[in-house]
Amino acid sequence: MKRIAVFPGSFDPITLGHSHIVERASSLFDVIVVAIGTNTTKQYLFPLNKRIEWTEKVFKNLSNVRVVTYEGLTVDFCKSLNANYILRGLRNGTDFDFEQSIATMNKTLNPAIETILLNTDPAFAAIHSSIVREIIKNKGDVSSFVPPQINVYE
């Protein structure tokens, strides 16, 4: 059976933290599905098509990484792909508390799903998409926070 992991997020925009987690995990799984989800509680800065384009550019050299979009519960999406793993990154203890709660809920909804938490490299621990969006809104330089393949000002 293939080891398929889903890495869900809004990727608004994709950051170096996101890309680093996927790059590290790419050797652990047969397939990683970077799943750009629709979160009904979020107001997006970038349109979905731009987030897809950027994410595909970032991972174009990783043959086992696919970029897709989805709606609904992540566990339901995982089931539709026969994926048994949800991949998430941890920057700090606050992330751990949040991710642990979600992992527990997901496990209750679908006991076959395992959540794999990877610690972020310290170089990327301060990068948070919401902070990056604020910098972008104020025309700041985000080149230290986003992959070089994307230009948030194009």
Image (cartoon, rainbow, N blue to C red):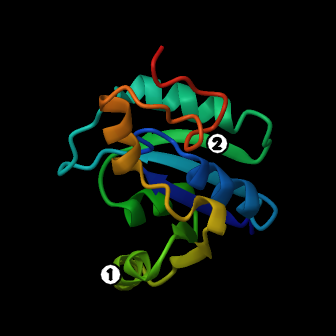
Q: At numbered mark 2, what does the secondary structure look like: helix, strand or loop? A: strand
Q: Is residue 45 left or right of residue 143?
A: left
Image vertical order of residue 126 relative to residue 84, above or below = above
Q: Position of residue 120 (x, y in %)?
A: 61, 68
Which numbered circle lies on residue 66? 2
Residue at 53 percent of width and 67 percent of height: 88
Q: Residues within 10 Å of mark 2 (few under 14, many from 20)?
A: some
Image vertical order of residue 77 relative to residue 36, above or below = below
Circles 2, 1 touching at the beta carbon (< 8 Å): no
Q: Position of residue 125 (x, y in %)?
A: 55, 65
The quadrant holding residue 75 is: bottom left
Q: Nearer the viewer, residue 147 or 55?
A: 147
Residue at the spot of label 1: 105
Image vertical order of residue 79 relative to residue 141, above or below = below
Which numbered circle lies on residue 147? none
Q: Nearer the viewer, residue 94 or 29?
A: 94
Estimate the spatial distance between the alpha carbons at disc 2 and disc 1, rounded to whole Å.
Answer: 25 Å
Q: Position of residue 76 (x, y in %)?
A: 38, 62
Residue type at mark 2 is: Arg
Residue at 34 percent of width and 26 percent of height: 47
Of marks 2 and 1, which one's residue comes earlier in the chain? Answer: 2
Q: Residues within 10 Å of mark 1 (few under 14, many from 20)?
A: few
